[in-house]
Image: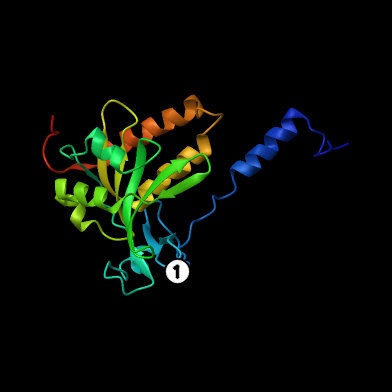
Amino acid sequence: MSADPMDGSPRTALRSLRRFARRPAVQERCELCSAKLAADHAHLVELASRRLVCACEACGILFNTDGTAKYRRVPRRIQFLPAFQLSDVAWLSLDLPINLAFFLHSTAVGRVVAIYPSPGGATESLPPPDAWETLVEDNPILSDLEPDVEALLVNRLGPAHEHYRVGIDECYKLVGLVRTHWRSMSGGTEVWKEMGRFFADLKDRAHPVGGTAHA
């Protein structure tokens, strides 16, 4: 008599796992034309909803940063800013509850917004305009951040404060990481390890701009 395929034996379970392992992974597709996507693909921002959209290279190159199209392409450059000037007093003037945030100019809102990760996802704040203007005066590199798609990412969680100019897809990757791995009131050890890995990888991929840090 043949064995019941649903008998729950280890051999049957192993066969099921093998069949599952042989199933092809779901192929990501361009949200504009449905073409198959490479692992490293372009991202666009839908300006009306501020939604990130995955795109193939052919669709991605159709959109620039002039603000006339429905979408805007997220730049892939990652810049580490070792000489960035942001004192403790200047940071406090930005009026944020935690020491990790990113800042971008939102066309929809008509001003710079600050966004920081939380267990519930991205939380938005409106920094005082005069505090941001002072920060731009001290750091001219902020004057040409690409609206809606590029951000200043600030990490002050440890003793070595870090500042990056990045596409917002990197920022939302960090938001997703925190939301996925946060446990209990303090976050748990796993989320802090994941954030450490994130910033180590980001710094490894970044191009330093602006010389050495100020004392």
Q: For mark 1, does the 10 Å Cα neighbourhood hold few (<14), some (14 to 19), or many (20 or more) residues?
A: few
Residue type at mark 1: give it: Leu
Name the residue: 65% across, 38% down. 17
Tell whether 113 sits left or right of 30.
left
Residue in view at x 72 percent, y 34 percent: 13
**Residue wearing tag 1:** 32
Q: Quadrant of the C terminus?
A: top left
**Is 81 drawn above or below residue 103 in the view shown?**
above
Across and down, in percent, residue 184 comes to 56, 29
Q: Is residue 168 visible?
A: yes
Q: Residue at x 40, y 33 (%)?
A: 195
x, y (%) of residue 132?
A: 25, 50
- Tell me which corner region of the image, top left, top right, bottom left or bottom right, holds residue 41: bottom left
In the rendered image, is residue 204 in sight? no
Rendered position, 151 above or below 95? below
Q: Position of residue 91 (x, y in %)?
A: 28, 38
Q: Residue furthest left?
A: 211
Nearer the observer, 197 or 147: 147
Q: Quadrant of residue 163?
A: top left
> Which of the pair 128/159 is nearer the observer?
128
The quadrant in which the N terminus is found is top right
Image: 161 above or below 205: above
Please name whichever residue, 22 or 198, is drawn nearer the observer in this view of the structure: 198
Q: Secondary structure at mark 1?
A: loop
Q: Position of residue 49 (x, y in %)?
A: 46, 64
